Amino acid sequence: MPFSVRKKALRNAYPFGARTNAPYRAWLKAQRAYLNRHDPTPAGRLLALLEPPPKGKESRFVRRANDFYPTTDPAAVAALSPFLPSRTRFFESCAGAGDLVRQISDLGHICLDTFDISPGCPVVRQYDALQWAGSDDSETVVITNPPYTWAILRQLIQHFLLHVAATWLLLEADFAHNLRSAPFMRHCCMIVSVGRLKWEQGTRHKSSKNYTWFLFTRSDDALPTFYPRG
Ligand SMILES: C[S@@+](CC[C@H](N)C(=O)[O-])C[C@H]1O[C@@H](n2cnc3c(N)ncnc32)[C@H](O)[C@@H]1O
């Protein structure tokens, strides 16, 4: 059967009524996987190996391995800066190419260690944050823009809650509203608005999503205070 006919027949056979919400998304995913198996062009087959375009930091861009989206936009650190006590001692546990750690250190804060599962520069050592032993010092914090893939992010937050007194994470603002975040929001005491960020250098385009810094601590009865921009 010609590929175009197969594609049209499949599109017309959508079984769930309105093309919205979870059933439609699941259908699109299944459809894409099926069509890529039958796509006669080499690119079509290769695309089958990729996940669907992500909705987060980089919806317009090709997804990068390990969610490597460095924080090069100074707006992220500018928003966090007023909330960091002078000479804050911090760990950057998913440091990428060191962009975030550089900007925070430039403000006089003290980086105690900087690592990443797949470092992007020699200053960042290779280490899996999920293996990190953590810190007993109640004055030290983790500050990072972590990978956003939920399966990893969830484990990282759990790990940080167990192994460090406080953790600042740069996340999509929507994190606060997602049901799956609820167990973590009980540990969140501050939400600092950042707004839209540029994830690609040399582009005029900002993200379609808003971002915020979330401060997580071990306490599980937190009522977060929201700090708007400006
Ligand atoms: C969104 S990037 C941010 C990089 C850096 N924090 C910054 O703000 O510029 C997320 C980083 O998390 C790293 N990463 C993913 N899983 C990790 C893990 N298990 N342990 C340590 N780093 C990890 C990726 O390699 C990537 O560099």
Image (tube, rainbow, N blue to C red):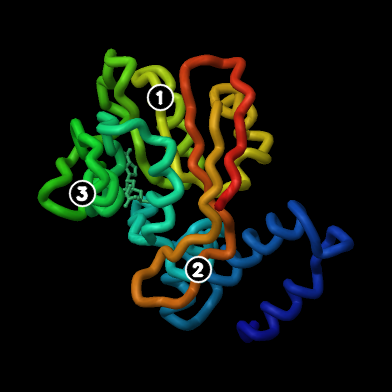
Please state if 167 lies on the left or on the right of 108 as rendered: right
SS under mark 3: loop
Answer whether residue 70 is visible to the viewer in this image. Answer: yes
Residue 132 vertical position relative to residue 171 in the rendered view, above or below: above
Residue 3 vertical position relative to residue 165 in the rendered view, above or below: below
Residues at discs 2 and 3 in contact (Cβ within 8 Å):
no
- Kindly identify which residue carries mark 1: 166
Camera-side residue: 58 or 85?
85
Categorize mark 2 by other alpha carbons within 10 Å: few (<14), some (14-19), many (20+).
some
SS under mark 2: loop
Q: Report if the beta carbon of the residue with label 1 is closer than 8 angstroms to ligand 1.
A: no
Q: Report if the beta carbon of the residue with label 3 is closer than 8 angstroms to ligand 1.
A: yes
Residue type (three-letter) at the residue carrying disc 3: Pro
Residue 230 vertical position relative to residue 85 in the rendered view, above or below: below
- Kindly identify which residue carries mark 3: 119
Residue 31: image quadrant is bottom right
Residue 227: image quadrant is top right
Return the residue found at the far right. Answer: 17
x, y (%) of residue 35?
Answer: 59, 71
Q: CA distance from mark 1 to mark 2?
A: 29 Å
- Kindly identify which residue carries mark 2: 206
x, y (%) of residue 137?
Answer: 28, 15
Residue at image position (48%, 27%) is: 216
Q: Earlier in the sequence, mark 3 or mark 1?
A: 3
Categorize mark 3 by other alpha carbons within 10 Å: few (<14), some (14-19), many (20+).
some
Camera-side residue: 205 or 84?
84
Q: CA distance from mark 3 to mark 1?
A: 23 Å
Residue type (three-letter) at the residue carrying disc 2: Lys
Residue at image position (39%, 53%) is: 67
x, y (%) of residue 123?
Answer: 12, 47
Residue 89 vertical position relative to residue 32 in the rendered view, above or below: above
